[in-house]
Image (cartoon, grey):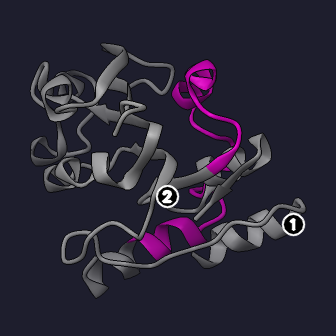
Amino acid sequence: MPAADRQKWDAKYAAEESAWREPSAVLLSLAKFLPSRGRALDVAGGAGRNALWLAQRGLNVGLDLARQRATAVGQTIETIEIDLEQSTLPRGPFDLILSICYLWRTLFKQFPDSLTPGGVLAIIQPTLKNLERNEKPPAAFLLQPGELRELAGSLEIVHYSEDWSADDRHDAVLIARKSMSN
């Protein structure tokens, strides 16, 4: 991510009242679909609230605030800082790739090759309908109706929904699995 964007997000997450501590309620509702061991990648994971929850479930997850929070509760997460708009995903393969509220459509071409056979892709991303109740994120960072299903490509869709979520966003939620034969 560009330096100016990094500074903006660092400042946001450094403010204690803004840095959420609990994992996404939507993510928690999807627990039955997610592995509890192996390697996980939390794409654009911010302060690490979701990465920490994944680590507590038994996954090896791979930023200063996220690492500090993990250490404080006796967990370890590996942090990798890269600009996903300029680089590729970190070297996999991963048993789980999680992306919440980060939309960079070109990543979807990389996800299948970054998953282990049987690996899970979990995406929670607001849709355009979100603007009916919320002014953020802006339309450029929102999915069209049904778009996330198409972005899954060759992955097997295990769960899909588009609705108002526990986080008061209109989210498209995708759980997809890579074939065991790939």
123 sits left or right of 103 in the view:
right
- Would residue 82 be counted in the magenta stretch? no
The amino acid sitting under disc 1 is: Ala
Rendering coords of residue 16 (x, y %): 66, 63
Rendering coords of residue 3 (x, y %): 30, 87
The amino acid sitting under disc 2 is: Gly
- Would residue 33 be counted in the magenta stretch? yes
In this figure, what is the number of numbered marks?
A: 2
Q: The N terminus is located in which quarter?
A: bottom left
Rendering coords of residue 78 (x, y %): 63, 71
Residue ID at (41%, 48%): 115
Q: The C terminus is located in which quarter?
A: top left
Query: Disc 2 designates what residue?
Result: 45
Compared with 41, 161 (above or below) is: above
Q: Is residue 170 visible?
A: no
Which is nearer the eye, 67 or 134?
67
Whole-angstrom CA distance, mark 2 to mark 1, is 18 Å
Query: Disc 1 designates what residue?
Result: 72
Q: Label 2 crowding class (10 Å Cα cut-off): few <14, some 14-19, many 20+?
A: many
Residue ID at (68%, 42%): 22
Q: Is residue 139 visible?
A: yes
Which span is picked out in magenta? Answer: 9-38
Compared with 49, 133 (above or below) is: above
Compared with 93, 111 (above or below) is: above
Q: Are marks 2 and 1 in contact (CB under 8 Å)?
A: no
Rendering coords of residue 114 (x, y %): 36, 55
Residue ID at (76%, 65%): 69
Which is nearer the eye, 159 or 13?
159
